[in-house]
Amino acid sequence: MIKKIIIILGIFVVMPMMVWAISSANYQIDPLNTGNAGGTPSNSAGFNLDRQQIGDVTVDVSTSPNYNIRHGHLYPNDSDVTIDFTVIPEKRIPATGNDGTRVIIDVYAVGGTIPLNSYSYYDTDNNGHYTGLVLTGTSPGTYDIAVKGYAHLRKRLSNVVLTGGTNNIDFTFAGAEKLLCGDVYVNGSYPDGDNVVNSVDVTYLTSRWAINDAGVSDERADVDENGQVNSLDMTKTVNNYAVVGD
């Protein structure tokens, strides 16, 4: 009886020192040791939690198709610059609840022409919002910051003060300004478009219009996101002809 009690007590002494791996069809949490300096990722079809140890000061973001989890210890002097931003593309059909797009964020020195850092691509939600973009490599300070949509001209804000922690940036000025559409053509020299609506965009859209009639969709050419490339997209593109983005 005494030996059994000792064995049971021994189990309770050893087990708190370890965190065991847990796995299932939906979750897999790899083993971590709370006293160790390292760790291993946790992965599954729905989750990807990068390594993080109790006591580790590293702050990072874990992402998956369904989740974006910022984890780690946040201290008052945390210098990570994070932005929550809003950007609305113009002339969408339907006009509400259809504002999602794929964007690039560029950070410039004030008045600069070459980005200090670029962050791409990020898909905004149907209301044009994106939450929790960590601007890795960008220190707190004053910058120009720009956004460019997947088939839209660049919008740039000047003298934006970015602080450590979360910064809220509204590229729409409370809904008054939207991204102008029509920069749909891309190639090796301009993988994100050339930031001007011109003849190559019209030519590309025309070619995709014909393909769309055969049942092939094109996310760039369908500038109003109504599920078709047609005369409506052409009209909206031509309305911005010769317009240059910021």
Image: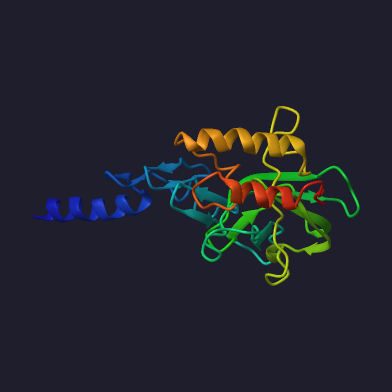
**Quarter in which the N terminus is drawn:** bottom left
Vertical position of residue 202 compared to residue 158: above or below: above
- The mark total stands at 0
Q: x and y percent of residue 152 in the render?
A: 69, 49
**Quick check: 222 left or right of 200?**
left
Colour pattern of the rendering? rainbow
* Whether residue 192 is visible: no
The residue most toward the right is 111
Task: Tell which of 228 and 170 is nearer to you.
Answer: 228
Please provide percent x and percent y for residue 6: 19, 53
State which quadrant residue 86 falls in: bottom right
**Relative side of 160 to 42, left or right:** right
Decide which of 57, 107 is in the foreground and name it: 107
**Which percent across, then down, holds residue 21?**
33, 44
Q: Of all residues shown, which one is farthest toward the bottom?
A: 174
Q: Residue furthest left?
A: 1
- Please identify the quarter of the rendering in which residue 77 is found: bottom right
Q: Is residue 42 left or right of residue 87?
A: left
Q: Is residue 220 above or below residue 6?
A: above
The answer to whether any part of residue 5 appears in the image is: yes
Residue 234 % position (x, y): 65, 46
Q: Residue at x 46, y 40 (%)?
A: 40
Residue at screen point 91% across, 53% down: 111
- Above or below, 224 against 199 in this view is below
Residue placed furthest toward the top: 188
Q: Nearer the viewer, residue 153 or 63?
A: 153
